[in-house]
Amino acid sequence: MTSEPAPCRPLLTDAELNALMRDRSLTPPRHAPIELMFADPHPVVLDGLKQTFECHPDFLVKTCVHDGASAWREILKLEPDILVMELTLGEKDSLSLIRDLKKEHLKTLPVIFTHASMLGALEAIAAGVTGLVSKSKPKEILMDCIRKVHGGQKWLDDEFSACRTATDRAPLAKSIFMRLLTLRELSVVQLLIRGQSNMEIANTFAISEGAVKAHLKHIYQKLQCDSRVDLLSRVRNNNF
């Protein structure tokens, strides 16, 4: 008597077959990585940033440069999503880059990663930067800042909390400057916003530093500002 052959077990169950046949278009697509460019005068800093971010799938490092002039050339060529930079970048500094990015309506958004003083931070805010992180913070903080800025939000590191307090004060409208200040005082304010020191302002107008200090004293009195920091924090939304 011959025995009947045992039934063959299917290679795939119905559930496994259905899973393979499922429409893959329903799977949410992965977001494209955020394209980055780093600008810093210190090679060690650039190497560390490059190695850190190249290992993370959320980011794509396009290039690294050491000065502002090179940064501007690469921005025009590559148009990265985010420019992460130190405040001091040589002849073309970060404040100039921030203003040029806004003027040319480029998509690249600036993030300042710095050891700068509170005054330097306020100058960056006055120029229009929306992301500011201290170099004393871990890389995760910088990553969070970049994500927020790329998403259209602002990020101000808690190390610059005094800047946050200062920028909470009501900004001075441009009409107030035009009404209260002389033409020379307006020119001094313009250079102040561009980050120039008292000596640089003096050289521009061929006057003494004492004369610049006198101009600033009158400007502060007319605008009811306590100091350079106070003034910079209140002109952040004005375009001179």
Image: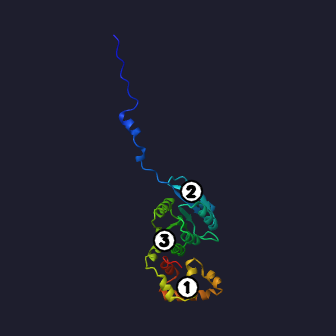
**Quadrant occupied by the N terminus:** top left
Do the residues under discs 2 and 1 have CB atoms within 8 angstroms?
no
Q: Residues within 10 Å of mark 2 (few under 14, many from 20)?
A: many
Q: Label 1's element? A: helix
Q: Which residue is mark 2?
A: 61
Q: Which residue is mark 3?
A: 160
The answer to whether residue 64 shows anywhere in this view is yes
Image position, residue 76 (x, y; %): 60, 64
The amino acid beneath tag 2 is Val
Q: Residues within 10 Å of mark 1 (few under 14, many from 20)?
A: some
Residue at 46% of width from left, 77% of height from top? Answer: 166
- In primary-sequence order, the first of circles 3 and 1 is 3
**Quadrant occupied by the C terminus:** bottom right
Q: Residues within 10 Å of mark 3 (few under 14, many from 20)?
A: some
The amino acid beneath tag 1 is Leu
Q: Which mark is residue 186?
A: 1
**Residue 186 higher or lower than 75, as above or below:** below
Image position, residue 120 (x, y; %): 55, 74
Q: Give the spatial CA distance, label 3 vs label 2.
A: 27 Å
Residue at 39% of width from left, 39% of height from top? Answer: 19
The number of numbered badges drawn on the structure is 3
The amino acid beneath tag 3 is Phe
| Front-lying residue, 98 or 66 | 98
Image position, residue 116 (x, y; %): 55, 71
**Residue 83 higher or lower than 3, as above or below:** below
Image position, residue 186 (x, y; %): 55, 85
Q: Label 3's element? A: helix
Q: Which mark is residue 9?
A: none
- In primary-sequence order, the first of circles 3 and 2 is 2
